[in-house]
Image: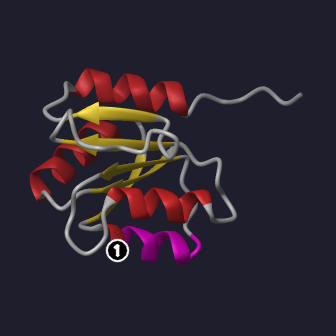
Amino acid sequence: MRRILAIDDEKQILDVINRVMTHFGCDVMLASDGAEGVEILNNGHRFDLVLTDIGMPIMGGHSVAKHIRNSTRPETPIVAITGQDNQDINRELFNFVLIKPFRMESLVDVVNLLTQEKPNN
C-alpha cells in the first residue's frame, strides 16, 4: 500500500485528496501546514510521495521540499500544489506541479506515475 503525506492549509482540498487517494488504495496522512508536515516526517513516518501546497502560513511548500531533499530520504517524490500558475516555483525541488483546480484523474495519474515500483538493478 502506497503511503502519501498530503499538506495543505485548505481543509476542503485535504478532504478531497484523502477521499480520492484512499479510494485508490493509498494510506494517506494529512497535515494542515508545512510545519505539521515536517513534524510528521521528523517523527519517523515514511512516505512514498508527498503532496504539498506551495503557499501556506507558518511554513510553505518550498521549505517542506527543502527539508525532504536534505533528509535521509531525499529521493521521496514531491508534488507541488499551487493555485497560481505564475507562482515562482523552484522546480528542481519538485517532481511535478499541479495547478489548482486540478482534475482528480490528474492527481491519480501523477501519484501512479511517481510511485511505480522501481526494478532492482
For the C terminus, the quadrant is top right
Q: Is residue 65 magenta?
A: no
Magenta: predominant secondary structure element?
A: helix
Q: How is the image coloured?
A: secondary structure
- Find disc 1 in the rendering and name its residue: 36
Choose between 24 and 75: the one closer to the eye.
75
* Percent coordinates x, y for residue 97 in the rendering: 35, 34
Question: Would you call the spot at circle 1 few (<14 residues within 10 Å), some (14-19), or many (20 or more)?
Answer: some
* Percent coordinates x, y for residue 35 in the rendering: 35, 75
Which residue sits at x=59%, y=73%?
A: 44
* Percent coordinates x, y for residue 10 in the rendering: 13, 57
Which residue sits at x=71%, y=29%?
A: 118
Choose between 90 and 25: the one closer to the eye.
90
| Horizontal relation, residue 121 to residue 22: left or right | right
Residue 117 occupies quadrant: top right
Amino acid identity at mark 1: Glu
* Count of numbered circles in the view: 1
| Horizontal relation, residue 1 to residue 120: left or right | left
Choose between 17 and 86: the one closer to the eye.
86
- Secondary structure beneath dot 1 equals helix
Residue 32 appears in view: yes
* Percent coordinates x, y for residue 82 in the rendering: 23, 43
Which residue sits at x=54%, y=54%?
A: 47
Q: Which residues are magenta?
A: 36-44
Which residue sits at x=55%, y=67%?
A: 45
